[in-house]
Amino acid sequence: MLDERSVTAVPVSGTWQDYAEAHALSGRALRLLALATPPLPRPVARTRAPRLTPRERPVISVVIPCYNYARYLPDAVGSVVAQQDVDVEVIIVDDVSTDDSLRVARGLAAAHPNVRVLASEQNGGHVRAFNAGWQVASGAYIVKLDADDLLAAGALARAAALFEAHPNVGLVYGHPRHFDGALPAGRVREVRWTVWAGRDWLAERCRLGVSAITNPEMVLRSAVLVELGPMDPALPYAPDMEIAMRVAAVSDVGWIGGADQALHREHGASMSATDGSGTLVDLIARAGAFASVFRRVGGRLPEAARLGDEARRALARDALRFASAALDRGRPKEDYADLLDFAAGVWPPATEWGTFRRVARATPPSRAARLAVLARRAGRRTRDRLYYARWVVSGA
């Protein structure tokens, strides 16, 4: 599962990230900074949300894969059953936990008639657990909510209202508020909608080489998921990125601004901090997600070859940016040689780029070159913050 670094492909500093989070819904400074990045794809609709609740009352299925998260599960389920103006179906899939997760899950099911529990016979990972829950889900829309995350109050009603108003939209997402420690309240300001043609949104993901979704803020139209098939268990660290892009290949994409749509818990035991952490792991996961999308739905995309090339170029650029940063910090070549190998493998022409040659030489900077090092570091930091600001205020 990718974290916010994967969304922006940058290691954003804690102080800057804290500032951006605090001003995510109404920060004028962030909007001005975002203007310094390339223009976003032209939306097919952008408006203040005419409604925050749907006219009809749809059933929304929330599948919660759980492995050894007994301590977080009540918060996750509680955030779902408290959703208003929609009917929720909660499906907890216990993935052979070794703690009290199954007992806690069954207790929650006993307390809430709209909660049910599936117990896997063998541990298969969070993607297979989600797919098992999806197979028995009945909702018009579906959410994968990890057991350590939460939905913000009103999130499902806001998403359902956008889906209802735009029948061509197959995916709705919004801002995920990241937190550690005390549980924050979801914020709501002036809610607005942006709808992109899915292929334009996908093209932007290829240009940047990154996801725009961390996971719990994503709601999918069930009919589209039935058409395309489930999440891919072969991509344990990027299933959400892959399914989002696959949906975008066949339907439009909606974004809800001005409200927190989910609460993403940061803690040391999360996948993004353990098995799924590390720059190379992230790059390989993203490369696998792009490859899967073009393998499975590339036939529906007239420009699939060009988009695939753009994605691979972007991944090579990211790998070299991280490798260059390591060199400029004086790290030994063995610390970033795998990033050079990745760049060369994912996009062979990258070996002819000046950055690749400079980093491959691994020559410690001379005194005369230290000014160039400082300039590169400042340039990377500026780019990181600009693109993070862009993502926070636009979702793209």
Image (tube, rainbow, N blue to C red):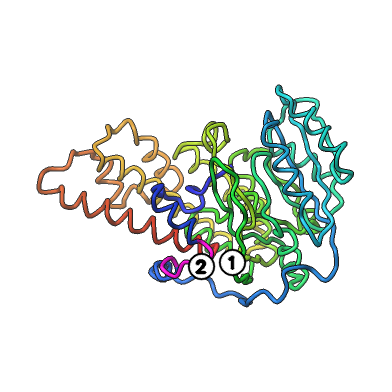
Looking at the image, is 283 positioned above or below residue 119? Answer: below
Magenta residues span 24-30
| Circle 1 residue | 258
Q: Nearer the viewer, residue 177 or 394?
A: 177
Picture residue at 24% right of the left edge, 46% below the top: 358
Corner quadrant of residue 335? top left
Quick check: is 308 in the magenta stretch?
no
Picture residue at 57% right of the left edge, 35% below the top: 270
SS at badge 1: strand
SS at badge 2: loop
Whether tag 2 and tag 1 are in contact, CB under 8 A, the answer is yes
* Residue 386: x %, y % from top left: 39, 61
Looking at the image, is 202 positioned above or below residue 282? Answer: below
Picture residue at 12% right of the left edge, 43% below the top: 366
Q: Quadrant of the N terminus?
A: top right
Q: Is residue 346 left or right of residue 59?
A: left
Q: Give the number of the disc on residue 221.
A: none
Residue type pointed to by label 2:
Ser
Is any part of residue 365 visible from this angle? yes
Residue type pointed to by label 1:
Gly
Q: Nearer the viewer, residue 263 or 361?
A: 263
* Residue 91: x %, y % from top left: 81, 42
Query: How would you rate the neighbour count of disc 1 (Cα within 10 Å): few for under 14, some for 14-19, many for 20 or more?
Result: many
